[in-house]
Amino acid sequence: MDFKEEGDPFLRERDFIDSLSNVVANYSELAKITGIGKIYQYLSDRPSVWNNEFIEPIRHTLYRTPSEKVIEIEKYSLFHYTGNKSEYRVSADSEKEATGSIAKEKNTPVLVIYAFINRHYILDLLPEVSVIRSLLNHGLDIFATDWGTHSAYDKCLTIGHFVNKYMDKSIDLIRKITKSDKVSLLGYCGGGDLAIIYAALHPEKVRNLITIATPGDFELDDSLLATWTKAMKENYLLNTFGNLPEIILNAAFILRNPIEYSHKYFHFFDKPCSLESS
């Protein structure tokens, strides 16, 4: 049985979507009445601090391309990839492989902007398949955002706060460090939407705008998560928990295809993909 083929139509039925929305709203209301929501908000900053200050610095060193933190504002950080300069020197072969536009713009710094749920190394998980290393190999000067792990204490932050404070200060710093008038923006997933917003507000600071896997026009997004989200009574969640608890977000990803999720890690470690044959 192909769950995606058989289960997808059911998960899109109006009755199911309404029931799902009501379950989340009722769960939120129950958590509010019993005080669980307040307890969550009070305790949520503890794991946030633990993750930002202890766990992520360790993850940052595992198989990652060398980088340094050049700015830290609240829980946000901006990283600059340094590495071994000789390792990332643009070779003659790399120059031939590079497109004309990349070769011309290689001196323009690039800011990689991620979605809020992604850490700055999501495109740099392993050296053999690192997007970041590939960009460095083409002579590009790479910076990357890291939004950190947020908690209910950050519930008042808006999109404008991220774009006009964190991103704008980062881009001004990048321009100062690199002595470049403009910065190229590479937005991944939801980070692409942030890049689009910033480019629209500050076009004088942006040279190129590139997006990967970015929703863009949310009205055209008919994925399961988008369909469910549009039906959610988000005020119940936000009033109770202050933000979207990660357990609910993870549950939504699992619900899309629970069979695939249950086998994902088993097959990943059982039969890893061959990097040599790719």
Image (cartoon, rainbow, N blue to C red):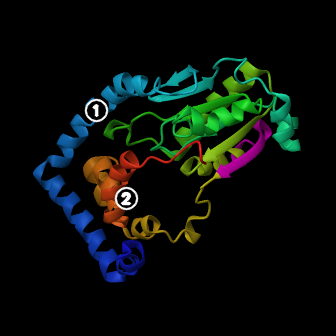
Amino acid on which disc 1 is placed: Pro
Q: Residue 105's x, y, as percent?
A: 84, 36
Amino acid on which disc 2 is placed: Phe
Please name the residue that numbered disc 2 is placed on: 253
39 lies left or right of 10: left
Q: Magenta segment range?
A: 200-211
Of callouts 2 and 1, the N-terminal one? 1
The structure residue drawn at horizontal position 70% and vertical position 30%, both measured from the top left corner, is 136
Task: Name the quadrant containing residue 23.
Answer: bottom left
Above or below for 244 versus 106? below
The structure residue drawn at horizontal position 66% and vertical position 51%, both measured from the top left corner, is 211
Q: Residue 247's x, y, as percent?
A: 28, 50
Please name the residue that numbered disc 1 is placed on: 47
Q: Residue furthest front?
A: 277
Task: Name the quadrant containing residue 33.
Answer: bottom left
Frontmost residue, 95 versus 153: 95
Q: Residue 209's x, y, as percent?
A: 73, 46
The structure residue drawn at horizontal position 35% and vertical position 27%, both measured from the top left corner, is 55
3D distance between C-alphas at marks 2 and 1: 22 Å
